[in-house]
Amino acid sequence: MSYEFILYEKTGRIARITINRPDRLNALHPPANAELLDAFSDFRDDPDVWVAIVTGAGDRAFCAGNDLKYTAEHGRARLRAGRAPFGGLTYDFQCWKPIIAAVNGYALGGGLELALACDIIIAADHAEVGLPEPRVGLVAGAGGTHRLPRHIPLKIAMGMLLTARRIPIQEAYRLGLVNEVVPLAELMPTAERWANEILEAAPLSVRASKQMATTGLGWPLEIALSRNYSEYQTAMASDDFIEGPKAFAEKRKPNWTGA
């Protein structure tokens, strides 16, 4: 698939996906969502790439959410026809490989929902986040109303949801919503540092950890501990399960194969 609204590249084990609509503050419309879904699906299914980084073009916005101009121009019925998940992965999409959001500016509405759907968030120090949908008669229906209260204290999440206010990234960091805040010039190097640290671990163990942590959240602890997890079984049966202890005993770096 050729892309008009995003950039997609792979370097070694890392995939980079860039929303490329800076003239619209990287706001997303159905064609862009379809391209993101295709790129994230390719990342998920490619055995040679193990970590993804998603960001936005330019220095103003990661993603300003839904493209309201497009919505106004095309109407509700057309938007629903053949609709891909917002941002490609905010719902109805499963991927156990880790995904890092490099938030290079505004992450508002669907932009914050896209970041929340990622596993790690690195943000530039001028970024702002929020779910302003109610101020334009919409609802944060791409996971924001459900994910935000799972990331920060309920009363604070409800305050953000009901007032539709946005907050500076430093406050988001204090609340535990993001992992690290850095100057814009350091954003992508920092995201890549996180990606490379992940690559030092066994890829199947990383995927098992993601699956177990995210799916276990909805269960009481005793049930979560007793459930069967497919990625855990895959990791236990892999060559890397033997390679890790062997490399430790031989005092060398492991050679992970993901097989």
Image (spheres, helix red, strand yellow):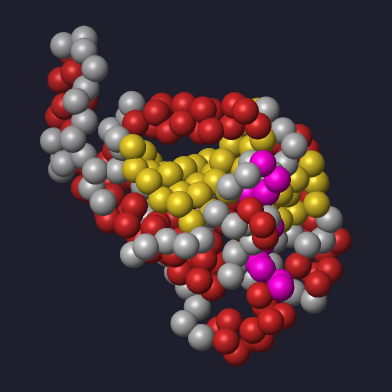
| Residue 180 spot, x, y in % from top left | 62, 31
| Residue 132 spot, x, y in % from top left | 78, 62
Indicate left or right for 181 with 220 as reference: right
| Residue 149 spot, x, y in % from top left | 68, 55
Q: Is residue 45 in sight in this rendering?
A: yes
Image quadrant where one finds the C terminus: top left
Tell me how many marks there are.
0
Q: Is residue 86 above or below residue 53?
A: below
Magenta run includes residue 61: yes
Magenta run includes residue 109: no
Q: Residue at x 74, y 59 (%)?
A: 131
Indicate left or right for 94 with 141 as reference: left
Q: Is residue 150 in sight in this rendering?
A: no
Image quadrant where one finds the N terminus: bottom left
Q: Residue at x 58, y 48 (%)?
A: 56
Considering depth in this image, is 41 or 19 the residue closer to the camera? 19
| Residue 44 spot, x, y in % from top left | 33, 54
Indicate left or right for 135 with 153 as reference: right
> Magenta residues, as a range?
59-69
Indicate left or right for 154 with 252 as reference: right
Q: Residue at x 45, y 52 (%)?
A: 7
Q: Is residue 239 above or below residue 77?
A: above
Q: Residue at x 76, y 67 (%)?
A: 133
Q: Residue furthest right?
A: 163
Considering depth in this image, is 245 or 71 the residue closer to the camera? 71
Q: Residue furthest top?
A: 251
Q: Is residue 225 above or below residue 33?
A: above
